[in-house]
């Protein structure tokens, strides 16, 4: 039996992430050996958004609330990766995976994050040493102040283990800032 037929049977002919049925095809969950156990059966909408992260529609992926509980490791791994990329740590923290499955999920994230540059709210690439402007008042937890909109943060650094954030000094305190609330100066 071909991988596609095997996945179609396993999924009942619907997308293993959202349950859709339009334009079904196979997607290998990298790193993969090409087997059905390391592939998922997806609709065209999910596959296009996974292959082009700039097109991700967070509301479409509300379906991950269900698919993250899948008994199929490849589906759980893809759900985990998508939730991480969407910044949904609240859901990521609820996922339980065996150590080998978690290592597979993280291996795919590491290769993606090494290749993906950090971008500000306008899609401009941020580099260490850049200056940025905060575009929204941000409450700084634990420091007892609010980083005001319009504040310039000079000489940012890009931390290795915190995705989607830069590090900089505001009011003399070194803090992490989400890139979605910044614009390059």
Image: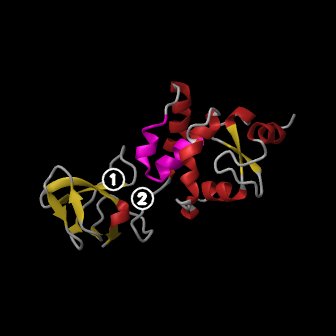
Q: Which residue is mark 2?
A: 118
Q: Where is residue 90 drawn, in percent x and y? A: 41, 45
Residue 59 vs 16, above or below: the answer is: below
Q: Is residue 114 visible?
A: no
Q: Which secondary structure, mark 1? A: loop
The majority secondary structure of the magenta stretch comes to helix
Residue 82 is one of the magenta-drawn residues: yes
Q: Is residue 79 left or right of residue 41?
A: left
Q: Which residue is mark 1?
A: 158
Classify residue 123 by image quadrant: bottom left
Using a 10 Å C-alpha cutoff, classify the residue at mark 2 as few (fewer than 14 neighbours), some (14 to 19) or many (20 or more): some
- For the residues labelled 1 and 2, the Cα–Cα distance comes to 9 Å
Q: Is the C terminus in the top left, top right, bottom left or bottom right quadrant?
A: bottom left
Q: Is residue 48 left or right of residue 91?
A: right
Q: Is residue 162 left or right of residue 49?
A: left
Residue 23 vs 106, above or below: the answer is: below
Stretch in magenta: 78-95
**Is there a contact, CB below 8 Å, between mark 1 and mark 2?**
yes
* Sequence-earlier tag: 1 or 2: 2
Residue 34 is one of the magenta-drawn residues: no
């Amino acid at each position: 039996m071909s991988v596609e037929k095997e996945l179609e049977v396993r999924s009942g002919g619907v997308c293993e992430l959202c349950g859709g049925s339009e334009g079904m095809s196979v997607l290998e969950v990298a790193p993969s050996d090409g087997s059905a156990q390391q592939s998922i059966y997806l609709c065209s909408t999910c596959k296009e958004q996974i292959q082009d992260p700039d097109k991700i529609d967070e509301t479409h992926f509300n379906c991950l609330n269900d698919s993250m509980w899948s008994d199929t490791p490849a589906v759980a791994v893809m759900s985990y990766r998508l939730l991480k990329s969407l910044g949904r740590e609240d859901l990521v923290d609820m996922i339980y995976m065996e150590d080998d499955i978690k290592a597979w999920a993280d291996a795919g994230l590491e290769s993606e994050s090494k290749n993906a540059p950090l971008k500000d709210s306008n899609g401009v690439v941020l580099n260490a040493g850049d200056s940025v402007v905060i575009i929204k008042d941000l409450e700084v937890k634990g420091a007892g102040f609010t980083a005001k909109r319009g504040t310039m943060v000079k000489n940012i650094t890009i931390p290795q283990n915190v995705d989607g954030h830069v590090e900089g000094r505001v009011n003399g305190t070194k803090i992490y800032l989400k890139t979605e609330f910044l614009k390059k100066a």
